[in-house]
């Protein structure tokens, strides 16, 4: 078979297990899309705009090896850069593939459309270098295979986005055939001496510890070690908690699971237990102003163990060149059982979790809303939590083994969930995909619901209409937090047009919500948007506390330099 540059790129994606690539057409990428279409088993999924296209690829990467989006030069790529920044912050591998000007125009002095109005076209790749782990510009067909492989290899190894720019007139030019995919996917191997030394230091620390506890952070998933953490927890028998960004990264039906660690809004008893531990094992943890509730809760001690993607730290010793995927099995093989922390947790007198059922005709509140959402979460559910109040409600859901929660707590882009959920649902159409999103967030990226309709994806969208940006209200209120109301449920008829099967429903009380939930579960031909009316003052108590602490952190006065 003869290969072109575009066909080579598409074949590599297929070899990696991708069945889809997301795209928005533009004149600099049209020939590229034609060439990529020659690859069998790679479907092009079209999006409403480039921001959504990038987030769709990010959502796809939450399930598959990586995600990929194809956009046009400047006017397309600039918009997609926002989503690329999110993928970088969230440690998700994806490719942003951009068409570029004809290679004859480089250095010619020509001024082209869709550019900044000057003849140097290197500005886009220079921008991309700041938000990716690798950025390549392909201006000649013979260099394409090497540069494409370079970008993909770095995205996979670093669990970060990479950028590929291809001149529009070479995408259909011949190039060499792709070799075995293992040349790209072979993982980095830990330094053996450092690995053994790190494992020895950790085991010595654990032998001295009285009540160790495992704390799972948001980078655990990107390292692909969730199953290894379960094996370590089973061997140790100690208590296990997840940080907010890692909710769902540990099997919650396991007896060792005790809840969420999130400062003063942690699950009952969790912060106290972690504070009193003499050896905290942090795995893939991220400490930022959000995860520490405005820097009020960063629980770190001299006896703690920090295991991150590329290095391990024990007390005052640091071991680099040690990869998480290699280190956890080494640690598990030598660790001894110590269930003291779990026994201490079980001995605590904690408040009983009460499930209150509201009267069916009472105005709907968030407690009743979450109770009914809990009722439809099964082992095949993936729940996307939009930036905002949904984060805090989501921490209280009980997840059966197999259920997933996805959030974006490092980047925190409102509106992220709609296109990201779309991308994820393309990858996982058979899961029960549910999204909690506020009205303010929804307005940023609402268009991508029409693509759910187009592909008959049975996503359940719980849209909380409380007339504004609740999370911003709790941090710093002002008139800018109020938005124009929409008929959100009514939008579904617009998106359906003449051939769609989406449902738009409204619920003002528990009875109406129960009926809407049943209809949503039975609608297998398209998305169901349930617009729930919630009082603007009704939000999670955790959000109120968290918002106050973050506001205090944001408003710290400038340091006085003497």
Image (cartoon, rainbow, N blue to C red):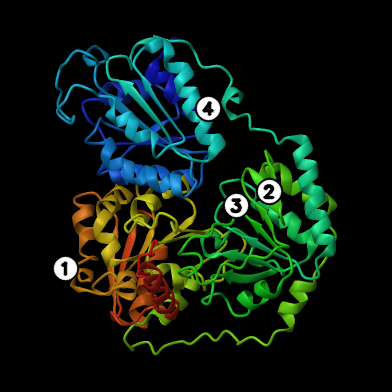
How many residues crowd mark 2 within 10 Å: few (<14), some (14–19), many (20+)? many
Label 2 sits on residue: 312
User: Which is nearer the eye, 457 or 75?
Assistant: 75
Of marks 2 and 3, which one's residue comes earlier in the chain?
A: 3
Of marks 3 and 1, which one's residue comes earlier in the chain?
A: 3
Assess whether mark 3 and mark 4 are in contact (beta carbons under 8 angstroms): no
How many residues crowd mark 1 within 10 Å: few (<14), some (14–19), many (20+)? few
Whether residue 420 appears in this view of the structure is yes
Whether residue 531 appears in this view of the structure is no
Marker disc for residue 220: 3
User: Which is nearer the eye, 224 or 426?
Assistant: 224
Image point 39% across, 90% down: which residue? 359
Q: Nearer the viewer, mark 2 or mark 3?
A: 2
Number of residue marks: 4
Mark 2 residue element = strand
Of marks 4 and 3, which one's residue comes earlier in the chain?
A: 4
Marker disc for residue 484: 1
Assess whether mark 3 and mark 2 are in contact (beta carbons under 8 angstroms): no
Q: Residue 371: x and y, percent?
A: 47, 78
Mark 3 residue element = loop
């Amino acid at each position: 078979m003869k290969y072109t540059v575009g066909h080579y790129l598409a074949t590599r994606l297929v070899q990696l297990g991708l069945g889809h690539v997301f795209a928005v057409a533009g004149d600099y990428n049209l020939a590229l899309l034609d060439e990529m279409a020659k690859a069998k088993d790679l479907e092009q999924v079209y999006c409403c705009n480039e921001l959504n296209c990038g987030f769709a690829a990010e959502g796809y990467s939450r399930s598959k090896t990586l995600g990929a989006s194809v956009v046009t030069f400047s006017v397309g790529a600039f918009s997609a850069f926002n989503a690329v920044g999110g993928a970088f912050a969230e440690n998700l591998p994806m490719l942003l593939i951009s068409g570029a000007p004809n290679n004859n125009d480089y250095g010619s002095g020509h001024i082209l459309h869709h550019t900044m109005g000057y003849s140097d076209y290197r500005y886009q790749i220079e921008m991309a270098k700041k938000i990716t782990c690798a950025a390549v510009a392909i201006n000649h067909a013979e260099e394409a295979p090497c540069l494409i492989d370079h970008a993909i290899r770095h995205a996979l190894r670093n669990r970060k986005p990479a950028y590929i720019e291809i001149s529009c007139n070479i995408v259909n030019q011949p190039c060499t055939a792709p070799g075995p995919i293992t040349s790209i996917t072979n993982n980095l191997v830990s330094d053996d001496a450092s690995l053994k030394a790190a494992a020895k230091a950790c085991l010595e620390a654990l032998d001295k510890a009285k009540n160790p506890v495992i704390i799972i952070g948001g980078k655990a998933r990107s390292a692909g070690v969730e199953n290894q953490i379960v094996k370590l927890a089973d061997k140790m028998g100690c208590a296990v908690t997840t940080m907010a960004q890692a909710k769902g990264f540990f099997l919650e039906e396991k007896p060792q699971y005790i809840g969420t660690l999130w400062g003063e809004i942690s699950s009952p008893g969790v912060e106290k237990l972690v504070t009193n531990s003499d050896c905290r094992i942090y795995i893939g943890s991220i400490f930022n102003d959000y995860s520490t509730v405005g820097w009020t809760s960063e629980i770190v001690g001299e006896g703690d163990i920090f295991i991150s993607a590329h290095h391990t730290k024990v007390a005052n010793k640091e071991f680099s060149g040690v990869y998480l995927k290699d280190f956890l099995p080494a640690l598990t093989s030598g660790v001894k059982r110590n269930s003291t922390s779990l026994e201490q947790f079980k001995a605590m007198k904690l408040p009983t979790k009460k499930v209150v059922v509201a009267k069916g005709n009472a105005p709907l509140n968030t407690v009743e809303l979450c109770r009914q959402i809990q009722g439809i979460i099964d082992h095949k559910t993936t729940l996307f939590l939009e930036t905002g109040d949904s984060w805090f409600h989501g921490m209280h859901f009980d997840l059966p083994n197999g259920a997933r929660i996805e959030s974006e707590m490092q980047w925190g882009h409102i509106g992220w969930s709609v296109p990201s959920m779309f991308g994820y649902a393309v990858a996982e159409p058979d899961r029960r995909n549910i999204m909690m999103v506020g009205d303010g967030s929804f307005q940023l990226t609402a268009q991508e619901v029409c693509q759910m309709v187009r592909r008959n994806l049975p996503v359940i969208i719980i849209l909380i209409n409380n007339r504004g940006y609740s999370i911003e209200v709790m941090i710093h209120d002002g008139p800018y937090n109020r938005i124009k109301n929409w008929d959100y449920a009514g939008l579904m008829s617009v998106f359906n047009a003449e051939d769609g099967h989406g449902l738009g429903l409204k619920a003002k009380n528990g009875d109406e919500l129960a009926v809407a939930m049943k209809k949503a579960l039975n609608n297998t031909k398209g998305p169901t948007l349930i617009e729930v009316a919630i009082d603007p003052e009704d939000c999670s108590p955790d959000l109120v506390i968290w918002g106050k602490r973050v506001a205090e952190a944001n408003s710290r006065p400038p340091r006085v330099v003497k």
